[in-house]
Image (tube, grey):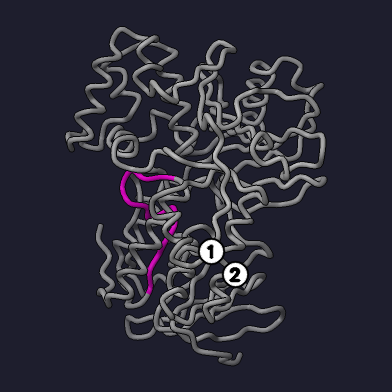
Amino acid sequence: METVDTFDAIVVGAGAGGLCAAARLASVGKRTLLIDDHDYLGGRAGTEIIDGHKVNIGAIALELGGVFEETFEMAGAPLNIREPKPATVFFLDHKIVDVSRGGMGMLIGGLTRKASKILDEFAKARSGSLPDGRQSTEDWLNGYTKSKTVHAIFRNLCAAIFAMNTSEIPARAFLTYFTSKGAFKRFGFHPEGTMGAWQALADSIERNNGEVWLNAPAEQIVVDNGAVKAVVVRKGDTLVRVKADIVITNCGPKATVALAGPEHFTADYVAQTTERLKPAANIVYNFASREALMTAPGIMTFGKTRRLCNIANLTATCPELAPEGWHQYVAYAVPKPAMGDFDSGAEVEEGMADLREQFPGFDDKVKMLSVRVMRDDWPAQRTGAGYDMDQATGIDGLWCVGDAVKVYGNGGTQACAETAKIVVEKVLAGAPEVATA
């Protein structure tokens, strides 16, 4: 094994959080190495080509505004996002309900007499009055309405954004997201698939004297006397040692502990990786059709379904994603439970039953491109909202970013970008590396 180089910082994992962290570091002059064990960028938010279709592996919607867009501006990277209008609609009893002007009040106001009380709780949450974190969103909602349609809508909103059922996400986290976080107010699709955005960030890293190594898994994070020293990387058949005083991982705290060795962390930190983190699963259906299945150009959230939560009409705004003459869609379902063991085959079929019910003649109209169950070591979320760990690890120079260390109540790529900003700012300020419970 040889030491090939020294960098100011090494980022392990080219998912959303890792790419944002590396791009930020490189943009301020830090010589940065970004590595990933896959041959593509984006991790669980990457893109693959299937039968000429650009198919996103997991996440599809990229948020405009906020920290995510700020990262691209800071890095000098183009963010070519097209916003559908309306961006979101609901599909209730086979009818499209556009709430782009009336919002949540318009939606639930027509479904339950208790709408005003529910909306009052949102108003209280905006002023900082929130549940204590132990009550689930389902239990919180039960206090105001028994309407099955309202419960179904809230369940599918939670499923679409957090890959969690309302029985699994704390009401505090749900309300925090919708009242003080991005809540997908502005989002769009990339005409090259999500990989277009990730490639723009990778290009900026290399323009700023950094390097990006794909097919280059981290084999070990070297720690000595409480501080990070290097990362051992496999390049082809060779192991190389790359020195750096700053290492940021985007592979989650659990994998970080495995790479660095549990003996270097506090017992509490190691325990949190198995006791606090609660991975959340979803099922992603990518398909295409010759005739349009829906008229809404953005994301359509369903009402009462078995497992299906929403569907995105990708080619309405980005026809480049599909070969000419094809309409391309992606639908998401969340299993029950999403944060626990389940029968993948049975849950996939539940989602398929929903698709057939919502779109009569579905099997005869579509070409299935892929069905992906995001779970176990490749979950939709490394931990559900409300169950995140700290970005700090307790080891000097070693930090985590991504969807296991989100700010409370946040979600999506915006949340991953936010963790990158927080960590990079602390690194640049020379903040001590202290993990909190």
Tell me where residue 173 appears, x and y as whole percent: 31, 38
Task: Give the vertical position of 111 relative to 104 (above or below).
Answer: above
Left or right relative to 332: residue 262 = left
Callout 2: SS: helix
In this orientation, which residue lies closer to the viewer: 158 or 100?
Answer: 100
Q: Quadrant of residue 398?
A: bottom left
Front-most of residues 249 and 64: 64
Q: In the image, what residue type sits under mark 2?
A: Asp
Residue 27 is left or right of residue 330, and the answer is left
Front disc: 1 or 2: 1
Magenta span dominant secondary structure: loop
Image coordinates of residue 313 in percent, x first then y, are 64, 32
Give the residue displayed 48% in from the left and 27% down from the top: 156
For the point 47% across and 63% down, the residue is 20
* Membership of 407 in magenta stretch: yes
- State the image coordinates of residue 396 (x, y, percent, origin top left): 32, 77
Rounded to the nearest angstrom, the CA distance separating label 1 from label 2 is: 8 Å
Q: Residue at x 37, y 16 (%)?
A: 108
Amino acid type, mark 1 = Ala
Q: Is residue 174 left or right of residue 413?
A: left
The residue indicated by pointer 2 is: 203
Residue 181 percent across, percent down from the top left: 33, 43
Q: Which residue is mark 1?
A: 77
Span highlighted in magenta in the image: 398-411
Give the mark nearer the N terminus: 1 vs 2: 1
Q: Secondary structure at mark 1?
A: loop
Horizontally, residue 157 falls left or right of residue 314, namely left
